[in-house]
Image: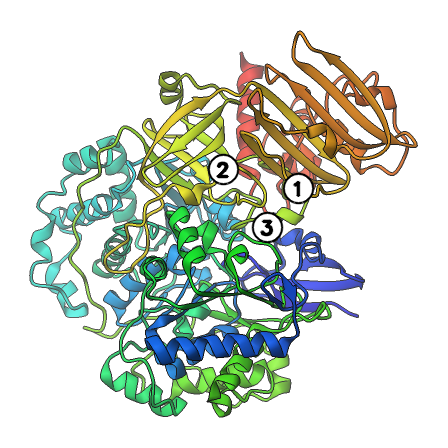
Amino acid sequence: MSGVRTTCAYCGVGCGVVATPTGGRSTLINGDPDHPANRGRLCSKGTYLGETIGLEGRLLAPMIGGEQSGWDAALDLVAERSRDAIEHHGPDSVAFYVSGQLLTEDYFAANKLMKGFIGSANIDTNSRLCMAGAVAAHNRAFGEDLVPGCYADIDEADLIILVGSNTAWCHPIVWQRIEAARLARGTRVVVLDPRRTETAEGADLRLKLRSGTDIALFKGIEAYLLQQGAINPREVEARVAVPADYWDSFADYGIDAVAATCDVPASDLRTLYDLFAARPRTVTLFSVNQSTHGTDKASAIINLHLVTDRIGKPGAAPFSITGQPNAMGGREVGGLASSLAAHMDFAPENVDRVGRFWRAPAIARQPGLKAVDLFRAVGEGKIKALWVMATNPAVSMPDAARVREALGACPFVVVSDVIADTDTSRFAHVRLPALGWGEKDGTVTNSERSISRQRAFLAPPGEARPDWWIIAQVARRMGFGDAFDWDGPAAVFREHCRLTAFENEGERRLDLKRWSGLSDADYTSLAPSQWGGERIAFAPGKARLFTVGQPAVEASPMLLNSGRYRDQWHGMTRTGLSPRLSQHRREPLVEVHPADALAAGLASGDLARVATTQGDSIFRVAVTDAQRPGEIFVPIHWTDRVSSGGRAGLLPGSAADPESGQPGFKSTPAAIAKVSPDWHAFLLLRQPPARDPECLWWTKIRVSGGTLFEIAGRTGEDVHLDEYLGAGELLEVSDPARGVRRLVVTQQSRLMSALFVARDARLPPRDWLIEQLASADPGPVLAFLTARTPGRSRPAEAAVCVCHGVGKSAIVKAIVKHGAASVAEIGAATCAGTNCGSCRPELARILAQQEQSLAA
């Protein structure tokens, strides 16, 4: 089979992929050189998609309780229990919780069933957790959820402001465009972030502002431009609708006041203000949504672009960059509880219009419950039947312990997923096997409004089926068959397109009429294309300013922030299957400023318990001055399936933005304290274990050839780690006085498993043993107990550049011995940084360290 053009499974950049099956589940992955989003480039996650499409852990048949069933029995039960809930408790007793991992066709089917025929708007999505603030701000400003810019604006900008976004890690292909613009036109880059991230390392100006003070900073720019006469209110009012109190709202945003609020030097603010004033071609890329004031933050950014006329023009846009591959598609069809469909809200005329189009007399007439309120209603017993699709709220929702209690109390829970055992599916009464990436067909919409095809290149495994098909089958069994009589995803897509155009006389920019009559063949070959044009401009008076103000910043001795790691994705359901993607960060770390670490008695490598009002979890400590004093950072990815600690979702509260319903994940009051285990261990296994350890703390990752556990425990815990080693020839050395034990099991001189235990945490590096675990050849058996091959002067090391497997020593060698004096020259010598580019900030840091060392 030749290469199949599809779209990446990860973030909202929407990169094109060419997948070439090579036999079985093996596939060669390359970037699509013809896709406008990436032009052949892929990040590390996209590069190693081929390592994530095996069938390990897959849900391959419907399950009722713990027993396998047929599709008819499972679908009949879902329909029966849903009908029963509606009959006895009303339509609002049923809810769907869906995902930006769904394709647009899946989203459309789910939204139509819930809002059109069940008659409730209780369908919300995990996209509520990452971009709802931007949606609400877009609706405020434009009357519709419109992203006015495009990726080409990055190429043409003279100033790029990154707000709350570690773009080099989270959107590496966007970061490559930023780097290219700097080389091509001298574009200046400003990063506004409480953390000194890898993105901030490469900025021309970085402001490590106090968490939650973004509104003050952007209002400060506007106040400065007003003071300098660079903004003429009368000219603005000729272009934009302006509230009566708008111009009076800047009195308290002088440079000194903003500097005090944001806790940044006034001189840095003045530099930013002057950069902005001198460069009309400005793009502001923002990810400020995960806040209880996220909508107002996004409005402050959009306001600034509107008053300075930096919108709808080349190189000028406020640009929300989304986190999931189809967050935009879900927004288009109405996958949020706060919208109806096709960018229409619940105004009576819209309800009438959509009801007539769907021929749905029971259509929902008001917004439903947003994510936080939805799970609160589940816990209160108001939701009797909950269907979760392609997401894991027991991990990703804030106050996750309460979410689990709610799921456990719900009378009927359905989970559609690709994975058999997730934190959420353990609460399911029915599990339905869905197709995964590479197996399903449909469309996705990326951050710049470009619709692309995801195409199947793998056969459906087991009894897995497309999500739209599963939804349609349930709808038919509920008595709505005629409305869900689609014969494939192309039919669903055509209906979606027709709805966007129905009675739309230019009132809504989302109008996909040109595709409403698409044939199945044309759908199969559909090329990526933006709706709304490359850029969206607004006629006079059509865009609106919205008055916002900086809220009081919550005082707390310690604030908890959370976010992503470079090579992982959400709950690691996919990326956790890739040994190479698991090497960059092997454990969930809590990053702590040196002053805070000193006060808490912490050092790098310690374990620490992070506690909030909602819960607590244990993390490995990383002391770094990249953190602001008084603020700590943890990753979002670890779940109960891969760790007993590192559970970020247990920590944030359920307080949400009153406008968008988006919960705050970025500034939770927290405490941190050292945890002192009695012993530490690592465990390497060629075969996956039947169970995970029961002890104080453990975490595991996939490595080449098997699994690596990091473990810590208390004296007296009956852990029985020896039992994990399996059959073979056992070698052991021990020193009871020092609390040291080393055990390895071999078969025909091949390493099968290893257990190293130490009382004082001084354990050898794991990398050489991991190499031996992956090897099919006999090894130096006695050396296994030393974790180093005889005569080897340096242990193996983890990769800095995951794409090309380049470690730090090779990079240092290129600098010291071969004279590499730039990141580009390091790349030429080692290939590091030449694929996705997300490691380039780290290469620059190593280069600077070596230059300082040589100069000393």
Question: Residue at point 57% right, 83% down?
Answer: 490
From the image, tell me which residue sits under label 3.
43
Relative to 29, does residue 536 appear above or below in the rendering? below
Q: How many marks?
A: 3
Disc 3 crowd rating (10 Å Cα; few below 14, some 14-19, many 20+) is many
Find numbered disc 3 in the image and state the secondary structure of the residue it sits on: loop
Q: Are marks 3 and 2 in contact (CB under 8 Å)?
A: no
Per the image, the residue denoted by label 2 is 646
Q: What residue sits 79% from the left and 70% below the top?
A: 1
The numbered dot on residue 460 is none
Q: Earlier in the sequence, mark 1 or mark 2?
A: 2
Three-letter residue code for mark 2:
Gly
Residue ID at (40%, 24%): 673
Q: Between 277 and 248, which is closer to the camera in this rendering?
A: 248
Above or below for 116 versus 538: below
> Which of the pair 784/1 is nearer the observer?
784
Q: Secondary structure under badge 1?
A: loop
Report the side of 51 relative to 621 (left or right).
Answer: right
The amino acid at mark 1 is Arg
Q: Amino acid at mark 3?
A: Cys
Residue 708 versus residue 259: which sits nearer the camera? Answer: 708
Neighbour tally class for label 2: few under 14, some 14-19, many 20 plus, Cα within 10 Å = many
- Going from N to C along the chain, the mark reached first, 3 or 1, is 3
Q: Quadrant of residue 263?
A: top left
Q: Nearer the viewer, mark 1 or mark 2?
A: 1
Circle 1 sits on which residue? 691
Q: What residue sits 62% from the left and 79% below the top? A: 72
Q: CA distance from mark 3 to mark 1?
A: 33 Å
